[in-house]
């Protein structure tokens, strides 16, 4: 399965729109996009998962690493547009308490 990634730079944040399946095979593609953004550390990152049909623990790991890197720069990671199924992954792992995860598209 291919992963579709689209990025848009806004004034205070990067918007990363992801579509497809986020798993051990496709996470490196998203990692190639997120790592330079998080290393720069000048903007928050908003990841739109509205069009992600499946995500495994590899995707969760990428988001944890991104969160840790952004925290070093006092920046935030927002995970937006998550489906019920993906939202449960964040709930079960306790990550919903550590990062901004929203089923809608608004930053809370």
Image (cartoon, helix red, strand yellow):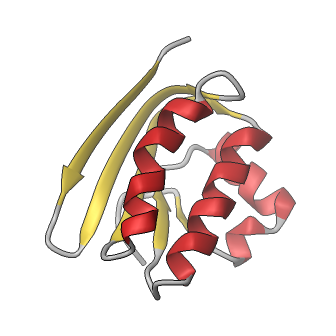
State the residue lying farthest toward the top: 1
Residue at the image point whose x is 84% and y is 60% from the top: 93
Tally the numbered discs.
Answer: 0
Residue 11 sits in which quadrant?
bottom left
Location of residue 24 by image quarter: top right
* Location of residue 10 with respect to 28 vertically, above or below: below
Q: Is residue 60 above or below residue 72?
A: above
Residue sitting nearer the eye, 10 or 52: 10
Q: Is residue 88 visible?
A: no
Q: Nearer the viewer, residue 43 or 55?
A: 43
The vertical placement of 6 against 92, above or below, is above
Q: Position of residue 52 (x, y in %)?
A: 52, 32
* Residue occupying the point 45% across, 64% down: 38
Furthest-right residue in this view? 92
Q: Residue at 65% across / 61% down in the picture?
A: 65
Outermost bottom residue: 74
Q: Quadrant of the C terminus?
A: bottom left
Q: Residue 25 in the image: x percent, y percent?
A: 66, 21
Q: Is residue 2 left or right of residue 11?
A: right
**What residue do we see at 53% from left, 43% from top?**
31
Q: Nearer the viewer, residue 94 or 66?
A: 66
Mark yes or no: residue 55 visible. yes
């Amino acid at each position: 399965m291919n992963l579709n990634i689209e990025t848009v730079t806004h004034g205070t944040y990067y918007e990363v729109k992801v579509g497809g399946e986020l798993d051990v095979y496709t996470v490196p593609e998203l990692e190639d996009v997120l790592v330079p953004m998080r290393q720069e550390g000048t903007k928050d990152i908003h990841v739109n998962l509205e069009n992600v049909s499946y995500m495994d623990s590899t995707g969760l790991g990428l988001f944890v690493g991104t969160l840790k890197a952004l925290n070093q720069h006092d920046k935030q990671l927002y995970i937006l547009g998550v489906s019920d199924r993906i939202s449960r992954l964040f709930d079960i792992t306790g990550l919903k308490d550590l990062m901004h995860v929203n089923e809608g598209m608004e930053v809370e």
